[in-house]
Image: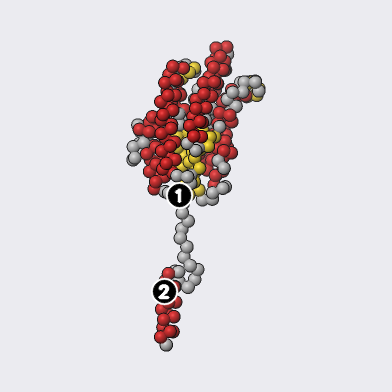
Amino acid sequence: MLSRRLSAVLLCAFALLTGGLGTPATAAPTPLYYLSLGDSLATGYQPGQGDTDTGYPDQLLPLLAERTPGLELVKLGCRGETSASMLKGGKCAYPEGSQLKAAVAFLAAHPGQVRYLTLDIGGNDVNQCLRAGSLDVKCLNANIKALSANLWTIITELRKAGGAGVSYTGMTYYNPVLASWLGGGSGQAVAQLSVPLVRGVNGFASTLYLLAGYRVADVERAYASGDFKTKTTVDGYGRLPLNVGRICLWTHMCARKDIHPNTEGYRQIARTFAATIP
C-alpha cells in the first residue's frame, strides 16, 4: 500500500513539473539579433523621405535570416554621426549618452544573442572636407588622423563587449565626388583626383578593421569606384565611365546632389555585406 501511495505522489509531482500528463512544456526560444551601427547609411536615409526601412540593414536582414531563422534587427545608427560623435554623443539622443555606449550596453545585456554586427562610420568625417564638389586635402589629412584613433577605439570596444561569438563586419565607402565628372573638364579632373584619396581612406580603415578581427565589406569595389576605363550607358546621361555611372544609378548624387544611396544602391551594399559575412 505504501509503495502505491509513493508511486502516486511521484506521478503527481512529475505531472506538475512537466505541465500535466500531456506534452512537456517547452521554453520560448532565445531571441537572436543583428545589431546595425553607423551613420545615415545605417538608418537608410533618403532625401525627401528621411530615415527609411529600405536601407542596407533592412535589406541585409532577410539575407542573414536565411542562415539564422528568427533573426531580429536592432538599428542604433544615427544620421550625421561622425567617429567623434559616435564616441561622445551629440548627434542623436541615447539613454547611455552615445551610440557606442548604447551598443556596448546592448551587447552586455544580451550575451550570446547577437550573431551579427555591422558598422559604417567615418563617411561624415570625410564629407566635412568637401568643398564645392572637391576634397580639401588639408582638412582631409587632419580628419583622417582623428578618425584613425576614434575608429580603433570604437571597433575594439565593440569587440571587447561582444566577445568571440559575434560576426563583426565593417565597410568601405563609395565615392560620391565622382559625380563631378558630369561637369566636364575641371569636374573630371576633380573626379580623378578623388579616387586615390578615397581609396587611401578606405585602405587605412580596412586595415584597422582587419587588425581588430572584423571582416570588410568592400563597397568601394562593388561600386567600381576606380574604374574609369569600362563604359556604361545611363539614361539621361549617355555613355559614362562605369564608376561614374554607378554613382548616378545607385545614389541621388547626379540627380539631386545628395550623397545617399537610393533603394538599389542600398541593395548593392546589403549584397556586399552578405557576400562578406560567412
Q: Nearer the viewer, mark 2 or mark 1?
A: 1
Circle 1 SS class: loop
Report the amino acid beneath label 2: Ala
Q: Which residue is pictured at 46% across the width and 17% down the height?
A: 137
Circle 2 SS class: helix
Q: Which residue is pictured at 66% across the width and 23% down the height?
A: 230
Which residue position is annotated with label 2? 13
Q: Which residue is pictured at 49% across the width and 34% down the height?
A: 211
Please identify the residue farthest to the bottom as the structure is shown: 1
Sequence-wise, the earlier of marks 2 and 1 is: 2
Measured as percent of width and height from the top left, residue 87 is found at: 38, 33
Mark 2–mark 1 distance (CA, rounded to whole Å) = 33 Å
Whether residue 145 is visible to the viewer of this picture, yes or no, is yes
Q: Which residue is pictured at 53% across the width and 34% down the height?
A: 216
Which residue position is annotated with label 1? 112
**For residue 7, above or below residue 80:** below
